[in-house]
Image (cartoon, rainbow, N blue to C red):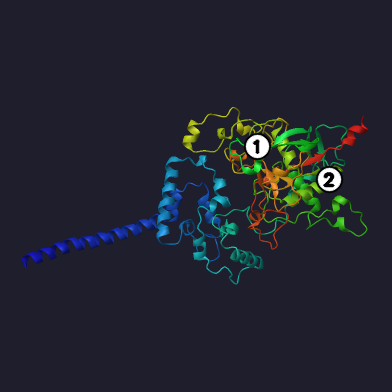
Amino acid sequence: MHKENIKTNRFIYLFVPGILLGFLLIYTGNKLMHITSTDTYCASCHSHPDATSSWKLSSHANNSSGIIVHCVDCHLPPEGIPHLTEKIKSGSKDLYSKLFKADSSINWKEKSELAQAKRFTYKESCVNCHQNIFPVSLSKEGEKAHLYYSQNENKLHCINCHLNVGHYNKNSIHAKNVSFGKKGAEVEAQNKIYTEPAKLKSFENFTEMIPGTSVKFDMVAIDGGKFLMGSPKNEKFRKPDEGPQHEVSLKNFYIGRTEVTWDEFIAFYNETASEGRPEEKTKPGKKVSKADAITGATPPYGPPDQGWGMGKRPAITMTHHSAEVYCEWLSLKTGKKYRLPTEAEWEYACRAGTTGPNFLNIDPKYFEKGGFLKNLFRKAPPVNVDSYINYAGNSTGMTSEPSGMKTNPYGLVNMLGNVAEFCSDWYDPSAYASSVSENPRGPASGTEHVVRGGSFKSESKDLRSAARDHTKTKDWLVTDPQMPKSIWWYSDCNFVGFRVVCEFDENIENNNQ
């Protein structure tokens, strides 16, 4: 009996403190979970320079209902085991960044873009809160957009369209930008207006002037010749669509010294925009020129320059179709034959007589983006790549103006990096196997067009003279709120632009002999 009492007492002595300790751990754990889930705690560790201020301005914090959506509501899954595990993982990363990384070393602009935001925002959390995606207050445009989402739910994230509901961005709006181009027109009205285009008397560099505007741009004369198009089998980072390497012969042509700028594109837009064109162009009995008769782009949704600025920066977010119509308009305005470069012309101009992986003839490994150890032991490139190419390794997360950038051997700026560039060819991964040798123009048909050169987002492996890419029309129009989608503007592509080619008229030199 005495032994049984001893056992009972031992059980009580151990069980009661154990229960109390368990309750204490649960209480402490819940308290710790609460403290580390507050907005103040997140802001104390998370070192994004404007995350808190932009959140306070967003519709998730500043709205008519007074309901605040907190950091953990979006950046962690709903409560449960995944919530806890992701909290530990993301918290550890944030703490490491806070202790060992300087804010200046992190590209915050890039991390705020859709591709990066998808990694830190959970779709299930959005759906957990917004269970009814067809509320009575939804607009007609919203109904169409949400219907599209419901039909493509497995491909879309809520933030494809609602990226800025959690972090306010004045440059991202769904409304049509009806004022687009007007500021450029006001500035242009103060400058000299050209009445005639450039007159060509021989095959040499020239400065084109667009009649009726104050816009001019430089064209570079490229002597025709032969070159090996594509990459050799032993080139590092080579992809199958870059071969087989084959000899190509090209005629003389002119190509833009830089990518088409916003100044140039807005001149086209202001004269041809299909909504809001000047009344005098459509008055009965008024003679309309062929250039005036071209119907151009509709107003874009939001600022197509992404808020980075216009002027001499390369024009972006226009579609391949929009670029082609621009070339048609420019041809009628100047009396010359302007168009997009063929893929062969583009690579010939980019290589500029070189045969290496890029026109600098240096191994891409020398300037590829890498971690601390890779950068510590890597040799410095033989030339200062940053002065030639705006890419992922040195970019501020946006396009740059051409001034200050060095040229390739043909005198062309930003042939690699800054913005990728449209070519006129349809894309076919096996196109080179059946390519003609003289002035090839690519496949006769296709669904997507060739894009070349890489951009400010590209790694060094994609900044090679032979590297090929192509338009991705469906992916680049995911968040376009229109049904059908726009033929003029990409809603989800801010890294592609174009430069123009002008065909050389051999009769010019013959007439001047």
Quadrant that contains the N terminus? bottom left
Residue topped by disc 2: 331
**Residue type at numbered disc 1:** Ser
- Tell which of 93 and 440 is nearer to you: 440
Point out which mark residue 264 bears. none
- Tell which of 376 and 452 is nearer to you: 452
Q: Quadrant of residue 238?
A: top right
Q: Secondary structure at mark 1?
A: loop
Residue drawn at (80%, 37%) of the image:
253
Looking at the image, is 108 positioned above or below residue 223?
below
Point out which mark residue 231 bears. 1
Q: Quadrant of residue 248?
A: top right
Residue 485, position as x, y percentages in the image: 69, 59
Residue drawn at (35%, 56%) of the image:
32
Left or right of residue 512, residue 319 in this image: left
Residue 406, position as x, y percentages in the image: 67, 31
- Crowding near the residue tagged with mark 2, few <14, some 14–19, many ≥20 C-alpha atoms within 10 Å: some
Quadrant that contains the C terminus? top right
Residue 319 in view here:
yes
Residue 185 in view here:
no
Left or right of residue 432, residue 133 in this image: left
Residue drawn at (85%, 54%) of the image:
293
Residue 66, position as x, y percentages in the image: 51, 64
Q: Secondary structure at mark 2?
A: helix
Looking at the image, is 437 positioned above or below residue 475?
above
Residue 394, position as x, y percentages in the image: 58, 37
**Residue furthest top as drawn:** 382
